[in-house]
Amino acid sequence: MDRIGSGRDTPGVKYLWNGNEFKYYDGINENKFNGAEFKKLIKKPYSELKK
């Protein structure tokens, strides 16, 4: 059976702003995508993201 990927957890979501990575979600375990957290994150101004 063929698999997609290299055996790492998939899927993955990266939040980039101006080429800078601020958040990375991957897989289905402890670092899985959290919609509520992500919604709060994307509403923050850039100056608050740098903290």
Image (cartoon, grey):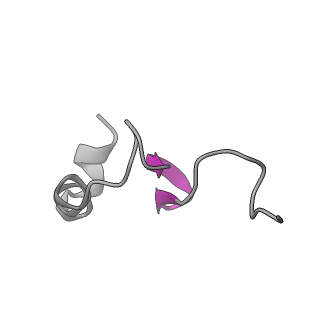
Q: How many discs appear?
A: 0
What residue is rendered at 30% in x and 55% in y?
46
**Is 22 inside the magenta-drawn segment?**
yes
**Is 50 inside the magenta-drawn segment?**
no
Which quadrant of the figure has residue 19? bottom right
Position of 45 with respect to 22 (left or right) is left
**Which one is in front, 36 or 18?**
36
**Which one is in front, 1 or 13?**
1
Picture coordinates of residue 18, whole percent (x, y): 50, 61
Picture coordinates of residue 33, whole percent (x, y): 35, 54
Which quadrant of the figure has residue 35? bottom left
> The C terminus appears in which quarter of the rendering?
top left
| Magenta stretch prevailing secondary structure | strand
Picture coordinates of residue 20, whole percent (x, y): 52, 51
Report the magenta residues as a range.
12-26
> The N terminus appears in which quarter of the rendering?
bottom right
**Which one is in front, 40 or 8?**
8
Position of 1 with respect to 20 (left or right) is right
Residue sitting at the far right: 2
What residue is rendered at 83% in x and 65% in y?
2
**Which one is in front, 35 or 42?**
35
What residue is rendered at 48% in x and 60% in y?
13
Position of 44 with respect to 20 (left or right) is left
What residue is rendered at 77% in x and 62% in y?
3
Does residue 49 lie above or below 4 as drawn?
Answer: above
Position of 51 with respect to 19 (left or right) is left
